[in-house]
Amino acid sequence: MSESYSPSRPCPVKNVPQWDFEADVLVVGFGAAGASAAIDAAETGASVTLFEVASGSGGTSAMAGGDIYLGGNGGTSAQRANGFEDDTEDFFRYMMMAGGPDADEERVRLYAEGALDHHEWLKKQGVPYRDTYIPGKPVMPGTGDCLILSGSEFAWPFKDEAKPCPRGHLPEATGETGGFFLLDALTKRVNSLGVDVQFDTRALALITDESGHVCGLVIEANRETRFARARGGVILCAGGFALNEEMLRQYAPIRKRLADDGLSGGYDDGSGIRMGMSVGGAAIHMDELFLTLPFYPPESHVKGMLINDKGSRFINEDAYGGRVAHFIASQIGEKFYLLVDDEIFEQPSEYSKIEIASVGETWEEIEADLGFTRGTLVSSVEVYNRHAADGEDPLFNKDANWIKPLDTPPFAALACHLKEAYYPFFTLGGLSVRPTGEVLTTDGVPIPGLYAAGRTACGLPRWGKGYSSGMSLGDCTFFGRMAGVAASKRANN
Amino acid sequence: MSESYSPSRPCPVKNVPQWDFEADVLVVGFGAAGASAAIDAAETGASVTLFEVASGSGGTSAMAGGDIYLGGNGGTSAQRANGFEDDTEDFFRYMMMAGGPDADEERVRLYAEGALDHHEWLKKQGVPYRDTYIPGKPVMPGTGDCLILSGSEFAWPFKDEAKPCPRGHLPEATGETGGFFLLDALTKRVNSLGVDVQFDTRALALITDESGHVCGLVIEANRETRFARARGGVILCAGGFALNEEMLRQYAPIRKRLADDGLSGGYDDGSGIRMGMSVGGAAIHMDELFLTLPFYPPESHVKGMLINDKGSRFINEDAYGGRVAHFIASQIGEKFYLLVDDEIFEQPSEYSKIEIASVGETWEEIEADLGFTRGTLVSSVEVYNRHAADGEDPLFNKDANWIKPLDTPPFAALACHLKEAYYPFFTLGGLSVRPTGEVLTTDGVPIPGLYAAGRTACGLPRWGKGYSSGMSLGDCTFFGRMAGVAASKRANN
């Protein structure tokens, strides 16, 4: 029955035979963005129906570590408890840099000023947080501690523009289950507010009235086509397109250089973005991805030297892994190497998928063993070591904390082939929206009745080289809420 | 009066007060794509009205050198006259590589097999060609000769996958006026076919019927709003978005790293692409640009060595300038350098905007003079020279023709700051289309009545690192014609 509907084609309201559902606000997707939208829409008095294609809540959000990027206004309780003062302007400037050349200033300003209140809101929903801090560069610690460094704050060029501070906030949860606990709390809250949740229902297409305004959704439920009317608006929170091969090829071919796995709860098929595009919504920054090429843990390896397969360094190794990954992927070769000495070497973690390619008593030996052109790897090490002795990195401004000469034999080169490692990625591009979630056409005019949040929208994170962990969930929850309020208001006008 | 219309919002046919124009096929834009579409639509029996915002024909196409990428089927007359045999499969393989990770195989196959006939068609339209060849790596020769090397055919990695051959074909014209002569011929042909050409008319919006099919155009002419009905289809040939700052920021922020000039006849405002998006057309590869960073002429400088501001090489210098430019722009620094010795040095051309930064009797002197970290520039030169003596480049596989040791003092480093040079660019992203020009939604279904060609569509050129001169005009004319035939056919069905 659903053959005649597609996310790429809106259904004119005149073709709707009957309304099977009706609410002030319709939400598509029960991840962090959809849950937050439903909560704030319900709290501002709207009746809400939430459609989720899976049989339970969570989506891709529940698979994440649960990290949320927070700070400003002097600092969160966790920041202050650990001696970090976080000025709103520093928070703002970092987020603007992280957003890249098209950072959304209005959005970043709202977030920088509102993040502390948002943290309180998260706690009120029942998300548990400690005030503890894990120093260094932990990756998915899973200890239940809260505060971590989750971006490039202490790394060049970011540290020069904004006073650094750790800003990743993890829920109290053991194992890598922070996202699950976050979603568990939000789900309970959605249920307690009496939101009408319809699981196992797939949004097939938007419904538009004669003026092109969005007034509902075509739904598939139990293999039947159903029609849902939205009095205020439809909020698309259906995730990104990490699982849509056609869209990845058309929009983000860089991922072809890397291994194959998209991070997804199973439904990031791009249908939310496509529904928005079907009514003239502009999808922007569709080429931007969050990539990881985790050459650490162990953290001591950040003190190593990354080189490309020509033997040249190309990035400060202490930048956030997502940033480093983009610089690796833009090198001409298919492999990269991490050079370490005996003092910093530890067994690479299973997670990092970087393996010992060569061990030697001299760098010359390793250079020859790996078939590097003579004088390439060795001269890179020579230059690095000469300045490392003074804690300096004149080429890439790596922070002194992560610098030491690689001069304690035996030496090793660890290697990673882009195509062989497991690199979960997710998509950052999506519908162009106002902070309220209003979906915009190419001339910046809202399409009445249509909202988007989370990775269906292009939000705070929109530049792979600047992405910092916690920005996506921060954006999902903060702007999900704003979309819920905006759609609710429209219903009552 | 036109305030209520926007390319981002289609006009429902029920709001059309009267039809001021009516034709089988409406064409928007009188550049190479629009002219070719109009010619073949008219020749297959359609009545055609062509709307052009400027007061004359030409568009951005007329500003180009007029280079058209041709070959295959054994070779064009110019190729064969100069001893080049060009097999269709080599032509096909090169075009596939040049199209990048999402090359459109169907489109490339049609073009590779049809390019020779298309050349004959161009001659028949009155475009004048000699059969002469300019060897080497000429840039905009302006001599009236025909055949030039216009891509990376003889450069790694392309030369390993397809037998190299020069394939750029310039019209006979003195000065850089090839595009003008091309358009002049096509314009005369359009006129002789009785196409109704409306200059000084701006396409404001598409008109859609109740099913969402495209059935016309809203036009502004003499500050009045006019309505044009298309019995067969509307063909959007309105260029790219090189002049639309908002779109550049949202889709192609890489150009922010470079100087400011978009190559345009004055109207590449993205309105064609936006009209397509307004009815659910998918715009793809919007982040891809043709960039140039012309570090030559003089041609002898291709024998020099390009390094980034860390002193590392990063690309084979003999690749096409557009490809080199993308690798320069993905380096972390804002400057690049070309190292030359006395044997190859000539005064840089005005055009190349690269200036002498340092001269010295040794490379050590130049390294120190420019403030490079000691041992960076010098070791890059040392490695290069050692293998150059044997005509080899183990790092980047530069072709032996362009390799010589840089060992004849005095030496010089020429420098170019990305922000200071004049780099005309144009956009490669556009509407997703079939080879027939049919505009596709995100699920690959055509939007009835809507066609696009030229840079309003995403065609053969869709990857900046692979772009070769002549691909855009080849695509404009070849697939412009196909769109004209397809829309004409639809009118007669």
Image: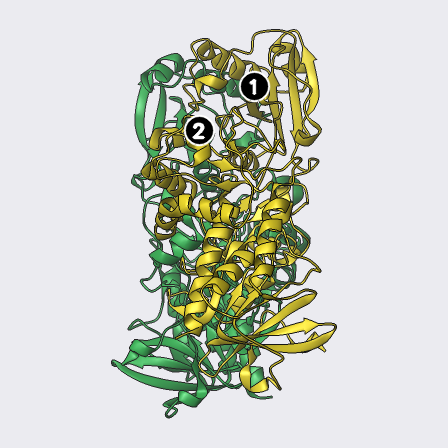
Chain colours: A yellow, B green
**Residue B212 x %, y %:** 53, 81
Q: Quadrant of the N terminus of chain A?
A: bottom right
Residue type at mark 1: give it.
Gly
Q: Secondary structure at mark 2?
A: helix
Observer able to see residue A129? yes
Residue displayed at 62% across by 26% down: A297
Please, what secondary structure does the residue beneath circle 1 have?
loop
Q: Amino acid at mark 2?
A: Ala
Q: Please name the residue that numbered disc 1 is placed on.
A: A304
Instruction: Report x, y in % for residue A359.
Output: 69, 13
Q: Position of residue B405 (x, y in %)?
A: 49, 20
In the depicted structure, whether residue B96 falls above or below residue B474 = above
Which residue is tagged 2?
A81
CA distance for labels 2 and 1? 32 Å
Where A155 sits versus A189, above or below? above
Please indicate, yes or no, whether residue B173 appears anywhere in the rendered image: no
Foreground: disc 2 or disc 1 = 2
Q: Which residue is the extreme one toward the right?
A: A223
Q: Position of residue A195 (x, y in %)?
A: 58, 65
Residue under the image location 59 percent in, 37 percent down? A172
Task: In the displayed orientation, state which residue is furthest to the left.
Answer: B223
Q: Residue at x 53, y 55 (%)?
A: A33
